Amino acid sequence: MLKQILSALCTSVFCGCLFAMTPLNDEELGNVDGAGLGMVLEDFAFESGSAVGDGSGIFEIGDIRSGDEGQAVLRVSRYYIAGDGSNKGANVMGNGVSIGQLSAPYTISVMDGDDFGIANKAMLRIAAPVRKGGNILSFNTETRSERRFPNQPPSSGQRVDSVAGIDLSTLNGEIADWIDLGLTFDLAINNIPGQSFDVPQSLQGHVEGLNIDGTQWRLWGDNNQVLANLDLNIYASSIVFQACAGGQVSGPSCGQTVQYSDYILEGQLGYGDDQPVKLTVLNNGQLQMEVGSIAGKSRAFYDEYYSSGPRVDIHIGDISVGNQRFGSSTIANLQIQYLNVRTRDL
């Protein structure tokens, strides 16, 4: 008797959970605001490839032609992700890093487009952890009058004068908690068709103390196109590039290192539905990313766009080549009125 009762209860429970799935339109999806999916990788380390650029390669891109009809092969021979103190890839395994935190995870979620200037649309948001505060960079400004276009009267307004401060406390954790990563390319060139390839040249890049808190993609569809707005926030305590001959990654065959210290990029691409970023696969198979034009908008739109619209700020605390230091460099308040980037066959 008990078995019959349990069987009846289980049958009723499972039957009560069977529902037909019905499609939702964009307006209905636009009202969805779920918690989404969070992701955290704790004590994560990854390494693939050879510590020496011996030309074996993890994967390669071939059929590249040089100007004199020679051939070239570009190989990715090594890449790694590790924690603080990786020493350019010498200390990877056993030196893990936490990518995200339980209190600040990476997330994938569905958002209401009305909250981001996209009316009656659902948006897919792919986001790095939310920052604890605002921007890293702050600027000193001054009022200047200058001619911004040829044969036009001068224009007065607030202009960026210098960097006022760098506040890393807006990010989650500290530099010792952030990511180290590296990548090595081998380029093998054969300038004489029919003969063997030359010994490859290697180009390596290493990033220390990488943090991308506040970065996010917001994607939606319209007329069979994928549209997006992008918030891009990157901090790296050090970025190092170096080229070596003979497939080596260190020693006398290597050139001088190029190093960026305290690299900061804070920017936005796209401005709601008025200036979306379009991601397209062209008929010839090439990829295209286009930041829409703001031509033909109203005066009210331009006043708002130039006062509080998307901008890009880039600051490098110090640039050095070998033992020569060149000091800091800053690009502030860069605004993109139109941009078209596409891949091409080499």
Image: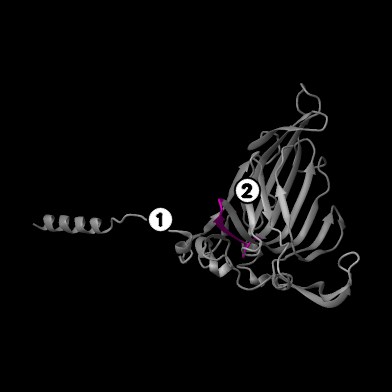
Of residues 327 and 154, the one nearer the viewer is 154
Whether residue 345 sits left or right of residue 125 in the image: it is right
Q: Is residue 223 magenta?
A: yes
Q: Quadrant of the N terminus?
A: bottom left
Query: How far from the left and from the top, in percent, is residue 129?
Result: 57, 64
Magenta-drawn segment: 211-224
Which secondary structure lies at badge 1? Answer: loop
- Residue reaching furthest top? 194
Of residues 216 and 223, the one nearer the viewer is 223
What residue sits right under mark 2 in the picture? 280
Rendered image quadrant of residue 66: top right
Find residue 23 and name its label.
1
Query: How far from the left and from the top, in percent, is residue 94?
Result: 57, 52
Which secondary structure lies at badge 2? Answer: strand
> Can the viewer see residue 27 in this picture?
yes
Number of other residues with Cα within 10 Å of mark 2, as a class: few under 14, some 14 to 19, many 20 or more? some
Question: Tag 1 or tag 2, which sits nearer the N-term?
Answer: 1
